Image (cartoon, grey):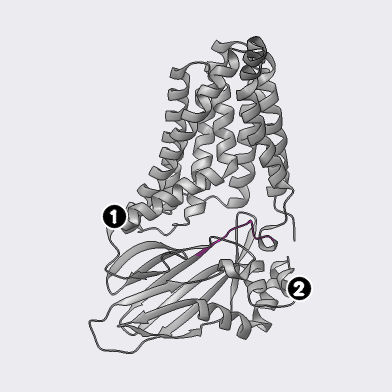
Amino acid sequence: MERRNMRRMRWLPAVVLALVLGGVLADLARPAPAAAHDATTTAHAEVTGSGLNVKAVLDLEYDLLMKSAWLYAEAYDAKERTEQLRQLKINRDAVTDYVTRRFAVAYAGKPCTPAQVGDADIRVRGKAAFAVLTYAFACQGGSGGTHEISSALFPDAESFVHSTKTMVRYELDGETGSAVLEATAPTVKVGEHQASSQIGEFFVLGAEHLLFGLDHVFFLLALVIGARRLRDVVVTASAFTVAHSITFLLAAMGVVDVPGAIVEPVIAVSIIVVAVANLLGRDEDKLGRWRLPIVLAFGLIHGLGFAGALDIKESGSWGLLLSLLSFNLGIEVTQLVLIAVLFPLLVLLRRTSAARWAVAAISVPIVAVSLYWFFDRIPLPL
């Protein structure tokens, strides 16, 4: 009996890792984001101005916006840019009514009056189309007042998505800053948003992006699988951190600009390369020779993906450096936690009779999922 229990315990690490990968494969079969309550989204808002005149530029996921405005399927199912722009134009009033009821600017405690400026535009983030809407807010009050920005876009009650966040960047009355608005904290008061709050918000945002960005998790897992010693893990993780931190900061500050349509498929390729190398590698010395340059090269690409999630791309955004560093710190801490959990499991696995096939059993599903991501992320011609 004791020997049988010992055998079962030897397989436990493999079972845990298999369950993780199985959950990801099951997740890929779920409906598209705007059609399922298990999905989430991030709205983006850039607010500028002073005193009584404020402008807000909003980026909102197109199909989700059209569903939330209770428009017909021909509107939210539109895939081509030309048709999406046409639908935004003919449904301008319905879209404006929805957005201005859920996104607001106030001055001196009084709500400002919104009006859409110009026609909407479309931009692509990753593979999703986002409607770009510009609103002018006319405020009332005397000088010396304080602006407040509030967002309740795409709430859980609408049942299309959950846990929506609105990333706000503002430059109002000489104050520059950023904030993450959500259901528990839907308002930011310009000039009173403490640095400590900003650090916490973007730290959590960075942690969530890595934790729920399964492509980055898979890349880390593939790297850890190929590392047999703790020293290898430390060197590999450090190289990845340095590489993605460099391009993350450069891209977020607008110094480097690579379209998401290129970055996202290449991230999927990076996972495939590392996982396949684990399958083919037999000599630890040979593995060591390719590991560091591969990690450094693909770490640079992953940094561009992190920057795309944060979406701070304007040159001269050094006033938002605190947000960038906090976001990156959240990524790093979460990365270390994942490694601390995964590596001991792999060490235990290598000491069992399952060690010979363990690398293949973990790497093959990673390759399969990453191939799916690669083809899914290739932009289709319009």
Residue 22 % position (x, y) = 69, 37
Q: Position of residue 75 (x, y in %)?
A: 72, 74
SS class, disc 1 = helix
Q: Residue at x 51, y 52 (%)?
A: 308
In the rendered image of this protein, does residue 10 appear above or below residue 257?
above
**Position of residue 42 in the picture relative to residue 20 (left or right):** left
Which residue is identified by label 2?
73
Q: Position of residue 76 (x, y in %)?
A: 71, 71
Q: Secondary structure at mark 2?
A: helix
Is residue 283 visible to us here? yes
Residue 65, quarter of picture? bottom right
| Magenta span contains residue 128 | no
Q: Main secondary structure of the magenta part?
A: loop
Residue topped by disc 1? 196
Q: Is residue 152 above or below residue 312?
A: below
What range is drawn magenta here?
36-43
Which is more toward the observer, 85 or 108?
108
Residue 37 belongs to magenta span: yes
The amino acid sitting under disc 2 is Ala
Q: Residue at x 72, y 52 (%)?
A: 30
Amino acid bearing label 1: Ser
Q: Nearer the viewer, mark 1 or mark 2?
A: 1
